[in-house]
């Protein structure tokens, strides 16, 4: 088995080919008003991408839901019920535009912030200095505490949902979307929306999530930042078994910079 973060030229070529084809398919579904600049994340329910308004050249972050048109009315009803939580992120530099139909897709649209997401940054650097990783984590904990006071949680924390700004700030993207996306997934009879990599045990068991769920996921992000790897790797079932039944690896056994 290949060591993590070591990819053959064929792996990289295949990945780029898949993303190119995906971008073309999403562009077609968006109907020409917007063009995909970069794929940011992907689940069974949606494609998250940075898109450009072809009229104004303005950039946006979009979560694109390519669901059947017959389900659009029901999806809008779910958004009316659950989408208000997206307004609860304090001092976020990512202004929400709204939930709307673009082309044949339903899209959650927000202004594109400066900087890059943590997933992209980690692809470039491999791992972070412990001091930086701790600083990022502390800022995110502060944001989670503010959300909890409003009875709101994230439930989708992973590097792709964490934005690093050019000014050195850190903030959570897509706050408040989890209840809507869970309801939308149930409407479409979808399961396994996310990989098991950053999910807490209660999520993997289909139980109710809580504030502790976000802390567990954030702990996994911290683990990834300082070690350059995840505690449990493999396919969905193997990773799930790790979170549910295996002890968490000791950071000092993996990263010599923590000794």
Image: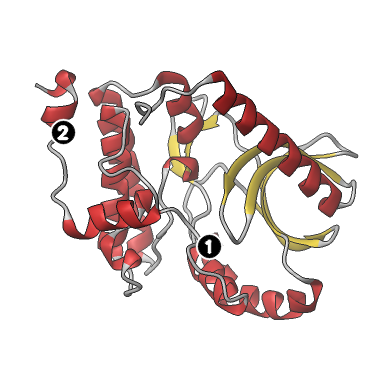
Q: Where is residue 215 in the image (x, y as percent from the top left)?
A: 27, 53
**Left or right of 136, for residue 244:** left
Residue shown at 51% from the left, 46% from the top: 92
Quarter-of-image position of residue 155: bottom left
Please give the residue where the numbered disc 2 appears in the rendered image: 251
Quarter-of-image position of residue 4: top left
Task: Work out whether 35 lies above or below 194.
Answer: above
Q: How many other residues sit within 10 Å of disc 1, few (<14), some (14-19) or many (≥20)?
A: many
Residue shown at 47% from the left, 34% from the top: 119
Residue shown at 51% from the left, 30% from the top: 120
- Can residue 168 be seen here? The reply is no
Depth order, front residue of 23/96: 23
Q: In which quarter of the image is the N terminus?
A: top left
**Left or right of 25, for residue 123:** left
Residue shown at 34% from the left, 24% from the top: 127
Depth order, front residue of 224/4: 4
Task: Give the distance between the C-alpha atoms of the residues marked 1 and 2, in whole angstroms.
Answer: 32 Å
Mark toward the viewer: 1 or 2: 2
Q: What element carries label 2?
A: helix
Q: Where is residue 199 in the image (x, y as percent from the top left)?
A: 35, 56
Please give the residue where the numbered disc 1 appears in the rendered image: 177
Q: Name the outermost residue toward the left.
A: 259
Q: Where is residue 105 in the image (x, y as percent from the top left)?
A: 78, 61
Q: Quadrant of the C terminus?
A: top left
**Left or right of 232, for residue 24:** right
Q: Is mark 1 on a helix, strand or loop?
A: loop
């Amino acid at each position: 088995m290949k060591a993590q973060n070591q990819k053959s030229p064929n792996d990289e070529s295949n990945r780029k080919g898949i993303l190119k084809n995906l971008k073309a398919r999403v562009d077609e579904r968006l109907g020409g008003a917007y063009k995909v600049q970069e794929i940011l994340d992907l689940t069974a329910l949606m494609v998250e991408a940075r898109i450009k308004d072809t009229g104004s050249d303005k950039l946006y972050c979009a979560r694109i839901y390519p669901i059947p048109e017959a389900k659009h009315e029901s999806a809008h009803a779910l958004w009316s019920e659950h989408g208000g939580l997206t307004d609860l992120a304090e001092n976020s530099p990512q202004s929400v535009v709204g939930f709307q139909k673009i082309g044949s897709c339903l899209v959650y649209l927000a202004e594109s912030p400066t900087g890059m997401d943590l997933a992209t940054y980690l692809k470039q650097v491999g791992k972070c200095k412990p001091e930086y990783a701790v600083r990022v984590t502390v800022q995110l904990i502060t944001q989670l505490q503010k959300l909890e006071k409003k009875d709101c949680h994230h439930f989708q924390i992973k590097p792709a949902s964490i934005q690093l700004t050019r000014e050195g700030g850190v903030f959570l993207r897509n706050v408040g979307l989890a209840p809507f996306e869970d309801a939308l997934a149930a409407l479409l009879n979808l399961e396994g929306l996310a990989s098991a990599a950053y999910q807490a045990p209660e999520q993997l068991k289909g139980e109710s999530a809580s504030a502790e769920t976000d802390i567990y996921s954030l702990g996994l992000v911290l683990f990834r930042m300082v070690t350059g790897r995840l505690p449990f790797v493999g396919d969905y079932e193997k990773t799930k078994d790790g979170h549910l039944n295996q002890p968490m690896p000791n950071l000092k056994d993996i990263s010599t910079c923590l000794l």
